[in-house]
Each structure stands twice: as C-alpha cells, then as structure tokens.
Image (spheres, grey):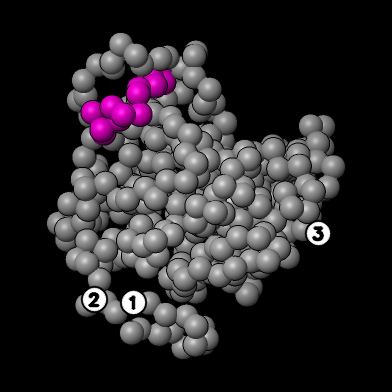
C-alpha cells in the first residue's frame, strides 16, 4: 500500500502492482495532465464525414456556445494569468471583481459581480501544484452530513475550503453561475451543492473536464442541479475515477447534462442520471508513452477554448450514439 505522510491514516491508494495496467496508465495520465501546461496552438481541422440526416444546426440547439466560451476563457484566465492580468482583462465585464487565493489548499478562484443583472459568476482553478494533486488522489469516499451523500474526499476538502472562503463574497439575493475546470470543476459542483442547501439561487453550473464526484445515490439526490458538463472528445479525466477502481458495487458516477465537444463544428448532447462512464477503449489504447504527450493536452482548458471557438459560427449536433464517428484521434502538436 502507498500512503501519504501528513494526510492521516485513513488516506490510501491501492497497491500499484495490484491494479490493472489500463488503470495504472489512466492514473499516470491524469497525474501528468493535471500538472503539465500546454501552449495554445492553431490546428488544422481534421477530415471528417458529413453529418447524419438527424443532425441539427446551431439554430435548433439548446447549447449556447458563446456562453460556454465565456466561461472557458474565464477559467483559462484563472488558471494561467496573474491577478493583475485578470483584473485588466475582466475588469470591464464586472462591477466588482475578486481573485482570491486559498492558502490552505494552495488554490484560487474568481468572483465577478454584475449588479445590473444581479448575477455573480465564479471560476475555480484546477490542479496546478503538488498539494492540489494530493487532494486529487484522496479518492476514497467520505460521507458529508451537510449534503447527505458520499463524496470524493479530496474534492470535498478542497470544496469545503472554497465554501468557507467564498461565502462572505456572495449576495444571497443574486443568481450564481458557478464554473470550474478539472479539480476546479469538482470543487464547483460540490460548492453548488452546498450553496443550494443554504438557499442560494444556483442558476447555472458549468464544468470543463470534470472528474466524478459522487455515487448513484448522490447523483439522484442532486439531479435537479442545473449542471452542464462540457467534455472534450479525447479528455480522459471526465471518466475518472475508473468505475472498477475501488467501489465496484457502488462506483463513482457522472450526472447532469453532458455536451461532448467533437471535431470541428460537431457536438453531441445527452442527459445523464447516474452513469459510471468507463474510459473509452480508444483512450485507453492511446495511453502509451508515444501518444501520452498529445493526449494530455486534450484535458487542458485551452483545448476546450479552441474547440468551442470552432463551434461559434456553425455548430452541428449529431446523435449521441453516433458520436464516435465524429471523433478525431488526439491532436499531435
């Protein structure tokens, strides 16, 4: 067994040798993906088949890609920019803007207030350092009595620190639009659960590359949250922790509305109630040393920005059951 000093006797990771090779590759992939940055590079559009007859255009789509791009850019700023650069870039968008560092978890978030609309927008940064990573790896379930569900313990600890820090900045009579990417996405979802229990108006929760947070019972309890999970076509993190990693009888699951960003203008949409969402075989097969560096970039928030921009002028919805037809191999930078 592997243990982590300073994180208490209950924290553990299953023996590395006892894990299946595919699971070991998945863990290695997510560790590297969470810590390594990648540049934003202009890429040629892949060659893909025309959409099926059942595909619909953006005019008939319930997805607002301009809204998603706004939050993706906001999260990219929180991930990469200095506080001064964030204030310069977003100061005109918001009447009040706060960028806050949480010392305990070595993470930060942004709160922007639009008084005329009585709206506050929140962006939570994902994993950027080793301390964040240790919380990612505390993947045993912990019962949260306030929420009444079992949750990923590392994500819970990060979210509770965020909850305590952010509450004094929030207006109870304002609508909250909460977003995050990677670890920040998991925090954003748990934060939304906590605030909804407190009676705040959680208008929207938008997550990018969000890992699983709870099990089927938790998903059922909070299925009414206005959650939209944005998942890039080749991002493996949205399928973690793996369904058969620890809790085989009651695994971690995804829930909420899911939009899959496929190549070019294509996307797929589905409503998920309690899906264990195993990692697609095509992603497992790509987890080799030769392909790893390209696959890691698919989890980067800048990859989401690029994919969303490709859908602004023309977005084509394809049936979810046919989405694999519109998936290109991981980009090679």
* Mark 3 vs mark 2: in front: 2
| Circle 2: element type | helix
Please state the total of marks drawn on the protein image. 3
Q: Which residue is mark 3?
A: 168
* Residue drawn at 69 percent across, 56 percent down: 194
* Mark 2 vs mark 1, CA separation in Å: 7 Å
- For the view shown, which residue lies furthest in the front direction? 249
| Circle 3 SS class | helix
Spatial CA span between label 3 and label 2: 46 Å
At 39% across and 29% down in the image, what residue appears? 268
Provide residue 52's location: percent of width, then percent of height. 28, 15
Rate crowding at label 2 as few (under 14), some (14 to 19) or many (20 or more) other CA atoms within 10 Å.
Answer: few
Spatial CA distance of label 1 from label 3 is: 39 Å
Q: Which residue is mark 1?
A: 14
Is 253 located above or below residue 273 in the figure? below
186 sits to left or right of 2? right
Q: Please state which of residues 327 and 222 is positioned toward the viewer in this rendering.
A: 222
Label 2 belongs to which residue? 18
**Residue at the image point whose x is 57% and y is 47% from the top:** 220
In the picture, the quarter occupied by the N terminus is bottom left
Q: Which residues are magenta?
A: 314-327
Q: Mark 3: give few (<14), some (14-19) or many (20+) Cα within 10 Å.
A: few
- Position of 320 compared to 96: left or right? left
């Amino acid at each position: 067994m592997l243990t982590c000093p300073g994180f208490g006797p209950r924290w553990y990771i299953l023996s590395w040798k006892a894990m299946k090779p595919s699971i070991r590759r998945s863990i290695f992939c997510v560790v590297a993906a969470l810590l390594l940055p990648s540049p934003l590079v202009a890429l040629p559009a892949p060659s893909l088949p025309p959409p099926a007859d059942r595909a619909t255009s953006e005019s008939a789509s319930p997805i607002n890609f301009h809204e998603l791009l706004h939050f993706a850019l906001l999260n990219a700023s929180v991930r990469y920019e200095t506080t001064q650069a964030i204030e310069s870039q977003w100061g005109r968008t918001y009447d009040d803007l706060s960028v806050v560092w949480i010392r305990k978890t070595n993470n930060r978030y942004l709160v922007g207030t639009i008084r005329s609309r009585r709206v506050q927008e929140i962006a939570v940064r994902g994993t950027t350092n080793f301390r964040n990573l240790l919380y990612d790896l505390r993947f045993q379930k912990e019962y949260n009595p306030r929420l009444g569900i079992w949750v990923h313990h590392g994500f819970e600890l990060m979210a509770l620190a965020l909850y305590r820090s952010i509450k004094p900045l929030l207006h109870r009579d304002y609508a909250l639009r909460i977003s995050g990417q990677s670890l920040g996405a998991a925090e954003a979802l748990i934060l939304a659960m906590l605030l909804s229990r407190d009676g705040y108006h959680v208008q929207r929760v938008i997550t990018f590359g969000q890992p699983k947070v709870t099990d089927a019972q938790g998903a059922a309890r909070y299925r009414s949250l206005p959650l939209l999970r944005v998942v890039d076509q080749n991002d493996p993190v949205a399928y973690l922790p793996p369904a058969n990693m620890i809790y085989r009888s009651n695994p971690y699951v995804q829930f909420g509305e899911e939009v899959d960003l496929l190549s070019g203008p294509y996307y797929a949409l589905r409503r998920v109630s309690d899906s264990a969402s195993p990692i697609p075989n095509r992603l497992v097969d790509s987890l080799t040393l030769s392909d790893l560096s390209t696959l890691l970039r698919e989890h980067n928030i800048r990859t989401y920005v690029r994919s969303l921009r490709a859908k602004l002028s023309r977005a084509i919805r394809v049936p979810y059951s046919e989405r694999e037809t519109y998936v290109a191999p991981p980009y090679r930078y």
